[in-house]
Amino acid sequence: MSHREFNVIVTIQNKSFINDPEGETIYHDLILKNQYKNIKSVRTAKVLKLVVNAKNPLEARSSVKKMCEDLRIFNPIVSDCQINILCDNN
């Protein structure tokens, strides 16, 4: 089976019990001051966009997960890491 390219999005954000000063600043200083009262909170995150060669989406996700853990891309004590494979339009 040949390899294909997969677009992978890795989202890293603080766990819900960890303060997010950047999100709080955006919420208080921009959103509330500009009357967007229907917005109730903001949490910020870091996003990595990767192109991965793999046999299938499961292998692509697995290799990115291993890379994130091996390279300590995130701290699992304070952060959540979500890995998504973008759908192919073909």
Image: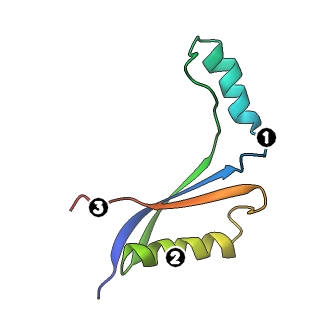
**Which image quadrant for residue 21?**
top right
Q: Earlier in the sequence, mark 1 or mark 2?
A: 1
Q: Is residue 2 above or below residue 43?
A: below
* Image x and y of residue 27, in percent: 66, 25
Within 10 Å of disc 1 (Cα), the crowding (few <14, some 14-19, many 20+) is few
Task: Give the SS element for disc 3.
Answer: loop
Q: Earlier in the sequence, mark 3 or mark 2?
A: 2
Task: Please report the residue visible at 70 percent of the width from the left and 21 percent of the height from the top.
Answer: 28
Q: Amino acid at mark 3?
A: Asp
Within 10 Å of disc 3 (Cα), the crowding (few <14, some 14-19, many 20+) is few
Residue at mark 3 to residue at mark 2: CA–CA distance: 18 Å
**Where is mark 1, residue-wise?**
19
Q: Amino acid at mark 1?
A: Asn
Task: Please report the residue visible at 57 percent of the width from the left and 24 percent of the height from the top.
Answer: 39
**Which image quadrant for residue 67?**
bottom right
**Where is mark 3, residue-wise?**
88
Q: Earlier in the sequence, mark 3 or mark 1?
A: 1
Instruction: For the N terminus, give its image quadrant.
Output: bottom left
Residue at mark 1 to residue at mark 2: CA–CA distance: 29 Å
**Where is mark 2, residue-wise?**
62
Instruction: For the C terminus, give its image quadrant.
Output: bottom left
**Seen from this angle, which residue lies furthest bottom?**
1
Task: Please report the residue visible at 33 percent of the width from the left and 81 percent of the height from the top.
Answer: 3
* Image x and y of residue 33, in percent: 65, 12
Name the mark on residue 52.
Answer: none
